Image (cartoon, rainbow, N blue to C red):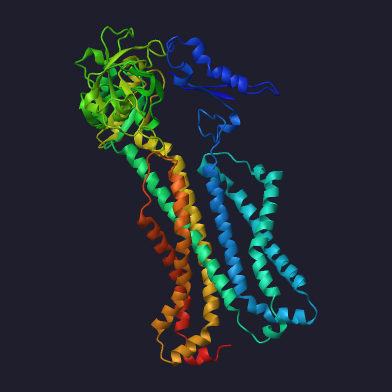
Amino acid sequence: MTVVGAKAWAFSTYGLLKRGESIEPVRESIRTLPDRHSERAAGGQAASEIWPLIVRQVRSVHLGARNVASPDAEDFGRLYGAIGIGALIVLAAAINFVTLRTALALRRAVEVGVRKACGGSRRALFAQFMSEVLVHVGVATALGVALALAALPALDAFLNRTIEWETLLTPPFLIGIAALLVAVTLLAGSYPAFVLASFRPSLVTKARTTGRLQSGVREGLVALQFAIVTAVLIATIVVHRQTAFGIGESLRMIQDPTVFLFSDCSDAIKDAMARVKGVKGVACSGSIPLLVGTGGVGPVIYNGGERLVLGEVNVDVGFFELFGIELVSGRYFSEEFGADKTPKDVKWTVPESIMLNEAGVAKLGIASPQAAIGQMVTINHPSGIVRTFSGEHTAQIVGVVKNFQMGTVRNDYYPTAFFVDPQYFGGINLKLDGRSIPETLGAIDRIARAMGPPGPPAYRFFEETVQRIYGDLQRDFALFSAFASVAILISALGLVGLAAHAASARTKEIGVRKVLGSGRAGIMGLLMWQFSRPVLLANLIAWPAAYFAMSSWLAGFARRIALEPWMFVAAALATLAVAALTVAVHAWTIAGVRPVVALRHE
C-alpha cells in the first residue's frame, strides 16, 4: 500500500500488510490520524476532511483515478481507448479481406462449379475456404507478434515504460492471441466463404457477375471502413487541438523564457540574480504553481461561517507582476507593507495580508472581487518555521487576481489564497530576455553555486515542464496519428484492389460508352463517383460516433475546446481526398482504353 499525504508535505510511505490482512482497518486508521493529533480542527470541520491521508494499494497506483472517496478506483479510459482503436483497425483490415475476396470470387467460380458437379457439398466448400482464411490469418498473426517483439524497445521509450518481451509469451497473452486469431478468421472469412460456397453450378459456368446484393454489401463494408478512418481522423484532430489548448493556457502568461531555479531565496541571492545581464525579473515561490497546481490546501473561515478548504500558495512580492497575472481589484503584495510577509516567528500582531483569485472569492461567498477588498478571514496556511501549518490567525484580503491556469486543464480554476512566507520558498523564478541564454544561465549557475545550497544547481525551463505535464496528451496525439496513418493505409490498399477489379469488370461497358460518344472526363467522373459514394456515406456513420466518443473524452477536462464543425468537415475531405487519389490512376488508365480494345475484352 502507499499512503499519500495532502498536508504541508508531499511524500509517500509504503507498508506491507500481513498475509490475509484486510486493508480497510489500516485505511480508516490512517484516514482519521489528523483528527487524533490536531487541535486546530476542534469544534469545527474534521481535520481529516481538510488534510486527507489516502491509503491506496500499489497495484492501483499506475491507473489510479486519484479519487479520495474511492482510493482503489482505476481509470481505464485511455487503455480502453487504445484497445478500441486497435480493434477498429483490425476491423478495417478484415473489411478489406471481405470486399476483395467477394469482388474476386468469380475467379474461383468455375472451380466451385466443378467441385459441386463432382459431389462437393456446400459445407465442405465452406470449411475449405475458412481453412484458407485461417492460414492467412495465422501467418499474419505470427508476423504481427514478431513485429511487436521487434518494436518493444521503441514502444518502451515512447511510453517511458519497461515492458519485457517475456510478457508477450505469458499464458494470458497467448490465449488472447489465439482468441484473436479465431475471431479475426470468423470475421474476415465467414461471408466470403459463404458467398463462394453458395455459387450454383448452372450459373458459374456462364461467367455471371456477382449480384446486386453482394455489390451492395461490398459498398456498405467500404463505407464502414472509411467511417473508421474518418472517426480516427476526427479523434486525432480533437486530441491535437486539446493538447495545443492546454499547453497554450499554461504558457499564455509566459512570453519570455522563464526558469525555475531550485534554491534558497534570500534577499542577497535575489539581488545578485537581478543584476545578471539577461535577467528581466526575479521572484521566489514555494513551488511552480502555474505548472504543478496549488500543492497544499488549508481551511479558511469567512464571516464566522464554516471552514472552507482553499488552495494555499506561497508566492513572493512581485510574483504576479513577473508573470503578468492581471489584478482585478485591490493591490499586489508590496515591500512597503510589513503585514504582507509572514513574521519570522510566525506570530502576527496585525492581520496578515493575503490575496485571492476570482474562484477563491466565489468559494467564500463574497459578492464580487471589489467587495472582497478589506474583508477579514481566519486562515491556516503552511509555515516554513514549524514545517507544518502556522495555526489559525486573522488575515485581510488586500487583492484579487484574475483566474489563471494552475496545473493542467484537466482541473478547473481552483479557489486559492496566496500568501508570502520567505522562510517557505522553494525556488526562484527567473525571466530571461532570450538574447544570450547560455551566458545568462552560466552566470546564474555561478551565483547559485556560490550563494545557494550545496551541490550542483538544478533548474527547469517552464516550457520543458509544460511539455512534461502534458506528456500523456502528446503521447495520445502521437498514437492517434499512428493509428490514423495505419487505417488510411489499409483502406487505401483495399481501394486499390477494388478499383482494379471494377476497372476490369467495366472495361466492356466503358468501350460501349466511348463508342456512343462519352469522353475521358465523363468516364473518369463515373468511376470516381462509384468510389466516392461510399466514402461520403461513411460520414453519416463516423460523425455521430466520433462526436459522442470525443465529447466523452473531453468531459475529462475541466477546461476544454469545443467540437467545431470544421473538424468533421476536414476529416471528411481528407478521407475523400485519399479515396480519390487512390483510385485516380486506375480510373484514368481505364478511361483511356481504345473502344476497339475495350469491346474485345473478356
Q: Quadrant of residue 601?
A: bottom right
Q: Is residue 256 left or right of residue 412?
A: left
* Residue 101 in picture, x, y percent from top left: 62, 71
In the image, residue 58 above or below residue 202: above
* Residue 274 in picture, x, y percent from top left: 24, 24
Q: Quadrant of the C terminus?
A: bottom right
Q: Front-most of 190 and 578?
A: 190
Report if residue 497 is visible in the image. no
The outermost residue toward the right is 119
In the image, residue 480 above or below residue 287: below
Q: Quadrant of the N terminus?
A: top right
Q: Front-most of 151 and 541?
A: 541
In the image, residue 151 above or below residue 385: below
Q: Is residue 126 left or right of residue 251?
A: right
Q: Quadrant of residue 498?
A: bottom right
In the image, residue 512 above or below residue 283: below
* Residue 199 in picture, x, y percent from top left: 69, 78
Residue name at image x 46 percent, y 11 percent: 38
Q: Quadrant of residue 257?
A: top left
Q: Front-most of 487 and 394?
A: 394
Residue name at image x 35 percent, y 44 percent: 245
Report if residue 377 is visible in the image. yes
* Residue 299 in picture, x, y percent from top left: 39, 18
